[in-house]
Image: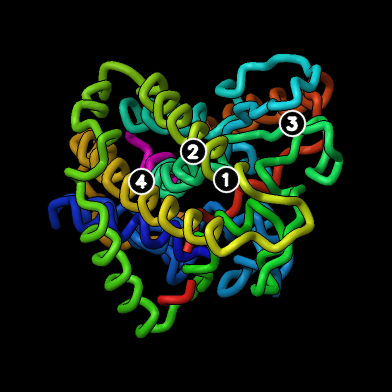
């Protein structure tokens, strides 16, 4: 179910100048030897999901050797509560480290200050991915219910614990149904040439159905926050809007253990396609804002991950990992749920690809 992320990136690509896309491609292709076929503007959007793979043959684990990097799983979602049963839980800040909002804000800081190609490449890949995740309603919600059929009173992990029946073997829970846009887009990377062509056609159809002018939430001034800030306030605003969709559209009218109605599936598909368009436009605006901050591309030949590593990048990554590990240990002691969500899955979309 990589198609949703690829669609978001494809939509964003159409909104940027060719020179801007070329600059991003020039940076991303530095890792082409280590991540072949996943080092251009569009394909890099699925990299943050694929690096989590521990063995081949699992969803989103084809085409690359397993990397087993799960340290960044919490960068894919925000645990904003939906608590209709008023379950008594300890209140926490859902936007703090680690969360998708925190990770995006850190990426903006990296774009502001870093001259390390390695650091910029790493954060660019996550930005291409996280913006998509934050527009899937169940990446921005944590359902708390007394009914244990809905998972656990301590949280449903963004719908991952709400089991449902569908005609698709892969779509076994509510979160996956929304990841796949109600079964519309379920193809996974790597794509054939025909699938790539269909991806471009699908992106064009989505933009035609949902042009910029039709999306009232789309604010061209959002990215004026950069470079004077890390834009965290803007990202929190996005999440609040998408969280409202989770309450209004994702949780309403669904029954655990049952097959979603035709009306519910139609709603999933319409909302998902709209969110794909919105995510693509916002991703383009964000990248257009940060593109002047990118350094001039280095000379040819530094096209491997090993060659681009330097002391600055290593130290920065070590510091980042220490912060993440410290936060994870703290959350394990205080958090109300036993394990991180599996919400680091791709956003939406299949049948047309």
What residue is disc 3 on?
Answer: 144
Residue 69, percent from left and from top: 66, 50
SS at circle 3: loop
| Label 2 – label 4 distance at C-alpha | 14 Å
Residue 122, percent from left and from top: 45, 45
**N-terminal-most mark, 2 or 4:** 2
**Residue bounds of the magenta highlight:** 115-122
Cβ atoms under marks 4 and 1 closer than 8 Å? no
**N-terminal-most mark, 2 or 3:** 3
Left or right of residue 207: residue 51: right
Q: Height in image: 288 above or below 194? A: above
SS at circle 1: helix
What residue is disc 1 on?
Answer: 250
**N-terminal-most mark, 3 or 4:** 3
Q: Height in image: 25 above or below 148? A: below
Left or right of residue 256: residue 260: left
Between disc 4 and disc 1, the foreground one is 1
At 65% from the left and 67% from the top, the residue drawn is 59
What residue is disc 2 on?
Answer: 245
Residue 311, percent from left and from top: 49, 36
């Amino acid at each position: 179910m990589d198609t949703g992320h690829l669609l978001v990136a494809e939509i964003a690509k159409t909104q940027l100048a060719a020179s801007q896309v070329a600059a991003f491609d020039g940076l991303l292709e530095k890792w082409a030897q280590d991540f072949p076929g996943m080092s251009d503007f569009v394909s890099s959007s699925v990299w943050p999901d694929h690096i989590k793979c521990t063995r081949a043959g699992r969803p989103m684990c084809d085409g690359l050797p397993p990397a087993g990097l799960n340290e960044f799983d919490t960068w894919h979602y925000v645990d904003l509560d939906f608590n209709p049963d008023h379950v008594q839980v300890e209140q926490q800040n859902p936007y703090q480290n680690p969360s998708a909002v925190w990770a995006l804000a850190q990426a903006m800081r990296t774009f502001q200050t870093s001259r390390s190609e390695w650091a910029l490449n790493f954060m660019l890949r996550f930005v291409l991915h996280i913006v998509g995740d934050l527009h899937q309603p169940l990446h921005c919600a944590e359902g708390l219910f007394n009914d244990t059929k809905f998972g656990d009173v301590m949280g449903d992990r963004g719908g991952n614990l709400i089991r449902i029946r569908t005609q698709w073997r892969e779509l076994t829970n509510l979160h996956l149904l929304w990841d796949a846009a109600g079964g519309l887009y379920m193809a996974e990377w790597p794509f054939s040439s025909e699938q790539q062509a269909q991806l471009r056609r699908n992106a064009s159809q989505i933009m035609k159905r949902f042009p910029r002018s039709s999306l009232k939430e789309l604010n061209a001034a959002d990215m004026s926050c950069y470079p004077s800030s890390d834009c965290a306030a803007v990202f929190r605003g996005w999440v609040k809007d998408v969280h409202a969709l989770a309450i209004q559209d994702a949780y309403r009218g669904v029954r655990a253990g049952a097959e979603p109605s035709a009306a519910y599936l139609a709603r999933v598909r319409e909302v998902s396609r709209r969110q794909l368009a919105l995510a693509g436009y916002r991703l383009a605006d964000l990248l257009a804002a940060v593109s002047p901050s990118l350094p001039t591309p280095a000379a040819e030949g530094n096209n491997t991950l090993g060659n681009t590593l330097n002391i600055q990048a290593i130290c920065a990554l070590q510091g980042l990992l220490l912060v993440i590990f410290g936060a994870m240990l703290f959350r394990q002691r205080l958090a109300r749920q036993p394990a991180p969500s599996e919400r680091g899955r791709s956003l939406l979309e299949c049948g047309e690809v």
